[in-house]
Image (tube, helix red, strand yellow):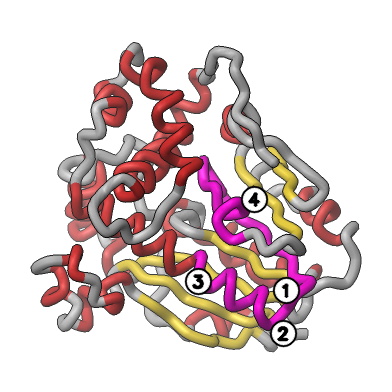
Amino acid sequence: MNAIQTEPVTLSKQLWDVSETGLLTLYCRAIESQSANPILVDGKAVEIANRLRPVLKASERAGLRRLARDKINQTLVVHIALRAKKYDDIARDFLGRNPKGVIVNLGCGMDSRFFRIDDGHLLFFDLDLPEMIDCKRQFFEENERYCMIGASVFDAAWMDQIEAVGQRPVLFMAEGLFMYLDPDKVRALVPALQARFPGSELVCEVCNRRWLNPWLSWMIRSKLQGSLQMGAGAVFSFGISDSREMETWGPGIQFLEDWSYFESNHPKLGMLKWMGKIKSMRRMQWTVHYRLGA
C-alpha cells in the first residue's frame, strides 16, 4: 500500500529552515511507539526515523543530530503522543459519523495518520509546504484514497482539489500548526474554509493569547527552543482567549468540544497531571473542535 523506497534519502536546506519541528514530532512518535506500554503505535514513524538517522547524524544542526540519537525531552514525547492519539480518535469518531468522510491534514509534516486510521473507505489529503511534501514523497506513496498536496495553507488554490471530490463531509485537522502562523491570516482562513465547505468540521490546536505578551512569550519561546529542543521557528504567534472565541469570527461557526492533554490523566504524565488541575495551565495550549455551519 505504501512501500518504502530504497533510494538514498535527500533533504533540502529549505526543509531544515522551516520544517525541523515536523521531524521532531516524527521522532517523538517513533520513540513512544517503541516504549513500554506505548500511548500509540506508529510503525511508519519508526521506519522513517530509522531511515533518516544517518542523514541527521551528518547534519550541521545540533538539534537534528540530537534527533538522530533520540535525545528528546520525555515530556515532549508524551505530549506529542497523547495529542496524536487524541487527533486519531477524533478522526475515527468523524468517520464513524460520516462513513464517506474526507479528512484534510493541514500542516501535516511527517505525520502518518492516514495509515493509522484508514478504514478502507477514507479519502485523505496531506497538506504542507512543497519542501516538506517533497521529503514526504520519499517515504509515502499516494493511492486512490491518499493524496499529498504541496502548498501553503493560505494558498486557496489547494481547496479546489478538495472540492473536486464532490459533496462529502470534510474534517480539517490542524495539529500543532495554527499557533505558529500569522494571526490575521488564521482569522481569514477559518471563514474561508466555512465558505467553501459549509457544514465541515475543524479541529485545531491553539494557545492562550495571554502567553503572547512580550514577557510570557519570551518564557514560552525559551521553553520550546530550550528544554523542549524545538527549532528556531518554534515561536507562538496566534492565540485565542477561550474555546468559544472562534464562534465570533462569523455566523454558523459552532464550538463542539475542547481538550487538553492534561485531561487524559495518562500515567506517563507523571507529576504533570497535577498541573492540569490549574485552570490557567490546562488552557495554556489545547485543542478546540468546531462545526463550520452554513
Q: Earlier in the sequence, mark 4 or mark 2?
A: 4
The nearer-to-camera label among 4 and 3 is 3
Q: Earlier in the sequence, mark 1 or mark 2?
A: 1
Q: Which residue is mark 2?
A: 293
The nearer-to-camera label among 3 and 2 is 3
Q: Residues within 10 Å of mark 3 (few under 14, many from 20)?
A: few
Kind of residue at disc 1: Gln
Q: Residue drawn 90% across and 66% down?
A: 166
Q: Which residue is mark 4?
A: 153
| Real-space CA distance between mark 3 and mark 2, rounded to the nearest whole angstrom | 22 Å
| Real-space CA distance between mark 4 and mark 2, rounded to the nearest whole angstrom | 21 Å
Residue segment shown in magenta: 88-117
Q: Which residue is mark 3?
A: 89
| Real-space CA distance between mark 4 and mark 3, rounded to the nearest whole angstrom | 23 Å
Kind of residue at disc 3: Asp
Q: Which residue is mark 1?
A: 194
Residue 94 among those drawn in magenta = yes
Q: Earlier in the sequence, mark 1 or mark 4?
A: 4
Kind of residue at disc 4: Val
Reply above or below: 36 against 252: above
Q: Quadrant of the C terminus?
A: bottom right
Q: Quick check: 34 left or right of 155?
A: left
Q: Residues within 10 Å of mark 1 (few under 14, many from 20)?
A: many
Residue 281, quarter of the rendered image:
bottom left
Circles 1, 2 touching at the beta carbon (< 8 Å):
yes
Circles 3, 2 touching at the beta carbon (< 8 Å):
no
